[in-house]
Amino acid sequence: MSFKVGIIGAGPSGLAMLRAFESEQKKGNEIPEIKCFEKQDNWGGMWNYTWRTGVGKYGEPLHGSMYRYLWSNGPKECLEFSDYTFSEHFGKPISSYPPREVLFDYIEGRIKQSNARKYIKFNTVARWVDYDEESKTFRVIFDDLANNRTFEEVFDYLIVATGHFSTPNMPYFKGIDKFPGAVMHAHDFRGADQFSGKDILLVGSSYSAEDIGVQCYKHGVNSVTISYRSNPIGCKWPEEIKEVALLTHFEGDTAYFKDGSSKRFDAVVFCTGYQHKFPFLPDSLRLKTKNCLYPDKLYKGIIFNEATNLLYLGMQDQYYTFNMFDAQAWFARDYMLGRVAIPDKLEREKDIKEWMDNEARTVSGDDHIDFQTAYIKDLMNNTDYPDFNLDKVADLFKSWLKDKEDNILTYRDKVYQSVMDDVHAEKHHTPWIKELDDSYERFFEEEEVADEAEISRVNYY
Amino acid sequence: MSFKVGIIGAGPSGLAMLRAFESEQKKGNEIPEIKCFEKQDNWGGMWNYTWRTGVGKYGEPLHGSMYRYLWSNGPKECLEFSDYTFSEHFGKPISSYPPREVLFDYIEGRIKQSNARKYIKFNTVARWVDYDEESKTFRVIFDDLANNRTFEEVFDYLIVATGHFSTPNMPYFKGIDKFPGAVMHAHDFRGADQFSGKDILLVGSSYSAEDIGVQCYKHGVNSVTISYRSNPIGCKWPEEIKEVALLTHFEGDTAYFKDGSSKRFDAVVFCTGYQHKFPFLPDSLRLKTKNCLYPDKLYKGIIFNEATNLLYLGMQDQYYTFNMFDAQAWFARDYMLGRVAIPDKLEREKDIKEWMDNEARTVSGDDHIDFQTAYIKDLMNNTDYPDFNLDKVADLFKSWLKDKEDNILTYRDKVYQSVMDDVHAEKHHTPWIKELDDSYERFFEEEEVADEAEISRVNYY
């Protein structure tokens, strides 16, 4: 096999790509030469927590947007790998909403069984890509951060798996430059502890605002105010959390809202989303999109329509995550191996447009789930990624939306059944709202710790 | 004139380069084709304040490390341009330690009199530089951030004027990942307000720690603890500021120090310096140095010894600032215009080594000042940058060191005489320690506002 594949990023998408090739190799088939490059010092992408904010050890913008006390905000049964179940990894049933460390352990569990690590060069960032039209190859400049050395590689296929929840979108509001308290984007939020007893303002009304809001409530802030642009999240909030209309401006430490109300705050967290950003690519090869379920220019959500040896993984807004990345990676592999033929450019454009038109017609959360389910089905029809009942997963997603609507503070106590191996999740030893310790050790403690004074002590409250 | 010069950065160094060419043009002489590219949306470099932290509007690592309530920490008479004095700009004497906005106004005042702005493309970051050995030209890829477009330019000379106080150096200490309060580098510090009444730990013992420490004291923190690695700053601190030995680790919100002491903190600010970082350059063209007065590989502190059409401005640790950048820019201009001959590589190496050896022999602050004074004299001997009495400036620097040692809280109330036009600085209307408003408007208020309640109101305290 005489071609060479470069993978940028060793998060869930990049690892899925490595895993896809490994599964091919295990069948006794030849695979191309593969190299994977990861900016961070370990794999796991977003799931690789860092205490740092802003830029990393070597001055690169940080990838991670994870914070302490982050628990999965969707049932684990919706993101389960079909070729490596939670039961297989943990050897027993666990609850449906594990904290970050436990999920990281699961992701790592699968990839550790492979030889993937030998393909990955860590602490290495892609600086620049030149595309040679004649040879149809990519010259990629990498920067070996730990050694302050640059080097080049040439690839026939380039896989961009760098995620799109790393580059903050942070609008300006009049007066924010004089706001005396802490101001940060959710990307740099590292846990509610520093806001204990404070009044905090969250700008935005998507997952970050919802999750940071309830974490702050759980961990003892005085009040949370969530300012939405068009529509409130609309949960049944506890008394300490309120939604208000769009922020208009600040005067000193006071924020003013469109409905004429105002309030003094100690801190502002911008939960205003992320930008798709690819600084290492010439703009002709860049995916230019907002966060949506079907970005333009990607055939099958993967193949860049202007240069079909450039592939993007995981660039969609996500209900499905790990198993969608898998389906994409398996499809990408089979495409590179020449097993999947693609139509000509115009046909591909038509196909993309059809999907985009369909997305435009979606209205509700359920519609979005159905859309992404259909997308993954389409991919899976073209690969040998172990089949699973996608309709059942879609049903889980819909239950999850309802659970959240019913009670934002208890939905994480619900348990579901695995679609992959039918194992029922175990009810967790402690209700989520009372569990202030998100560590792996605490998660797997057998006995229920009912002593709240002890929990407080352990958590320095 | 058939060559082309690219300037990266429109801070004090890049602007000095533009000004140097302008002064040549005003004499009726021809100048080369010039283009300057600035990542930020305005000129002024570090002096262009932003409320943002981490990454900017377009996701680039932020250049700015400035914070609210920053006043010059050296007398303005030491950084005065010799071709544009403070008196000329403000039309009257002002005090010796102006706040940031006033200094920004001064920098901008000179450059606004020129046509420099037409050479500068803002919101544009250098992505990658390829050097063509044969043609001895640089191909530079730029990214037009606002339009998400990349483009190429080719230059005969490349001037790197991107500064070296933008990329945080942030060491890891055991337990910092579980510290519950705010953790930030001085680069992301935006003012003491949010720490009012708190106990804060500053790690480091250079200018950032000293200045953030006294600002926090002035603006009402409960206590400041400064942890030094080798030697304390050694000022006569007020009771609320203490210096302690090296930080060893954290347990929860408590920091432990090498001398066995420990203390609980609400926040940690790392004042641990900056890295020289040039992500857009191949490592063969990168200046690799720590912060020092004479970085290796730079002939005359400017010309990269491995590729003599690559010039660096302002890469030294700085006592002198604006007028040193000017002297460098004038020298760089005359070198590019062919008026200054340089010896062969080995001779240049010898010369660099001699300077570096001299720096190695410096011990005291006074020695450092003498060293940098000698360096600038050497440059000025080769240019027509308006001459000024450098020995007098060196004396001012030495007085300043003594003033700070005498009283860290009152040294900014001292006034000096301009070396450029002999104008005596005016005593400021309010002692620095009582002045909580750092705005341009407040600085130029005529009457003394003695009413502290009023000051408090204006500043939202």
Image (tube, coloured by chain):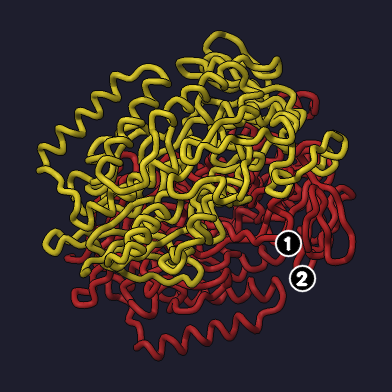
Chain colours: A red, B yellow
Identity of the amino acid at label 1? Ser
Decide which of A83, A51 is in the foreground and name it: A51
Q: Position of residue B245 (x, y in %)?
A: 53, 14
Note whether residue A361 is visible. yes
Toward the viewer: B336 or A300?
Answer: B336
Quarter of the image for the C terminus of chain B: give it: top right
Disc sitting over residue A205 in the figure: 1
Dot 1 crowding, Cα within 10 Å, few <14, some 14–19, many 20+: many
Instruction: Answer left or right for B187 relative to A261.
Output: left
- Viewer can see residue A106: no
The secondary structure type at the circle numbered 2 is loop
- Find residue B336 and name its label: none
**Which comes sooner in the sequence, label 1 or label 2?**
1
Q: Quadrant of the N terminus of chain B?
A: bottom left
Residue A390 location in percent, x, y?
Answer: 57, 69
Q: Identify the secondary structure beneath mark 1.
A: loop
The percent position of residue A388, horizontal first and vertical second, equals: 52, 65
Q: Nearest the camera: A14 or B375?
A: B375
Q: Do labels 1 and 2 touch, CB within 8 Å?
A: yes
Q: Residue at x 52, y 25 (%)?
A: B400
Q: Tell me which residue sits at (21%, 66%) in the image.
A: A3
User: What residue sits 22% from the left and 40% below the top?
Assistant: B299
Tags 1 and 2 both on a single chain: yes
Locate residue B449 relative to residue A206 in the image: left or right: right
Quarter of the image for residue B236 reads top right
- Residue occupied by mark 2: A230
How far is disc 1 from disc 2 in space, using C-alphas? 9 Å
Q: Is residue B174 above or below residue B169?
A: above
Vertical arrangement, residue A331 with respect to residue B213, above or below: below
